[in-house]
Amino acid sequence: MQIKLKDRDGMAICRISGEITIDTVLELKKTFKNIIDNKTRKVLLDFRGVDYIDSSGLASLIDLSRNLKVTQGIVFMSELSPKISSIFSITKLDKIFRIFDTEEEALKNFYGY
Amino acid sequence: MATKERKSRFFEYEERIRKSYLELKKAYAEVQDSYAEMVFRLALVAEYKDDSTGTHLVRIADYSTEIARAMNLSAKDVNYLKYASVMHDIGKLVVPDAILKKPSGLTPEEREVIKKHAALGADIFKGSRSPLLKVAKLIALTHHERYDGTGYPNGLKGKDIPLFGRIVALADVFDALTSERPYKEAYGFDEAVEMIRVESGKHFDPEVVKVFLKRKNKIREIWQATKDIDAFVKDKANEQRIEN
């Protein structure tokens, strides 16, 4: 798994690629911890290159969402492949997370927050 | 033809081949991705019928792949298992709702109808040439067989039960034990692990049980992660209900 993190107007844009699984999730959790520690309130997770996500990966997204809620922050997600999208559907997380087709669309919506 | 020209043509062809290869690779990845997507969505249809929580499928896939990796199965086989395991109960699509959703007190006849879901699931994949669907067929057919030969539908014994079936059998039972049902509370993690342990050589393959116990910490992580997902989804659903 690879993570590229960049800051854009105070928003954290996190581009993830590879497999988010029980064996790789620790690195993602560390990135999320840094984001929270830096008091970033708007986070965009770009799933363009993600091949697979397992239960541990999904739980890490929930942790991020919960931690951001404390600081009144928010997480958006974009560019989910059909496979990743179906994993979100079977766990019903598609109805909870704010998911956008493209990164651009997600960023546009960020300005309302 | 001048050597220089020949060289330039060679590089031109090489570049074309490289581009075609990359395009093919991308197309192949897209086909694989759609294939996996359909597997998950098809399995989801069976879940709707069964009123299970959404994370049931994820847990089965995660427990099964964790065990398979620890048993040193090839990356290809682990991958087949990851997707094929989510379709283990696909045969329930053909079982009448009146029986499937009956909370308790099934008659022996009704129990027999439910048992048919294994063979019915295998029928759905019959004749497929896809290696993944062949694994799905094996799993659907054999995930209720028991190591001591007292399972169904064919009463297979020991290593006559395909390894994929032996792995999913344990994953499925462990998940059932740790899940709440209309007629029972969920067992705690350690209690459920112990129940699996005592069934070594009876319900389950001792080798699969051994690996499962060895990977107990990872199994606990998966169990905890899906509990978190379920709690989060439930909380959010309640919040939305209050807002509306």
Image: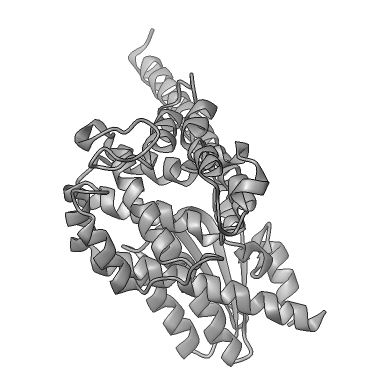
Which residue is found at the position 31% from the left and 62% from the top? Answer: A23
Q: Could you say which quadrant of the image residue B140 lies in?
A: top left
User: Which residue is outermost to the top?
Assistant: B1
User: Which residue is outermost to the right?
Assistant: B244
Placement of B141 over or under A56, stated as above or below: above
| Residue nearest the observer in this picture, A88 or B215 | B215
Q: Is residue B119 left or right of residue B145?
A: right
* Percent coordinates x, y for residue B125 in the rendering: 50, 27
Which residue is found at the position 54% from the left and 40% from the top? Answer: B109
* Percent coordinates x, y for residue B183 in the rendering: 53, 66
Labels in figure, total: 0
Any part of residue A13 in sight:
no
| Residue nearest the observer in this picture, B46 or B185 | B185
Q: Could you say which quadrant of the image residue B135 lies in?
A: top left
Query: How are the residues colored?
Result: one colour
Image quadrant holding the C terminus of chain B, namely bottom right
Q: Is residue B49 left or right of residue A56?
A: right
Placement of B88 over or under A111, stated as above or below: above
Image quadrant holding the N terminus of chain B, namely top left
Which residue is found at the position 38% from the left and 78% from the top? Answer: A30
Any part of residue B199 in sight:
yes
Which residue is found at the position 62% from the left and 54% from the top? Answer: B102
* Percent coordinates x, y for residue B37 in the rendering: 56, 44
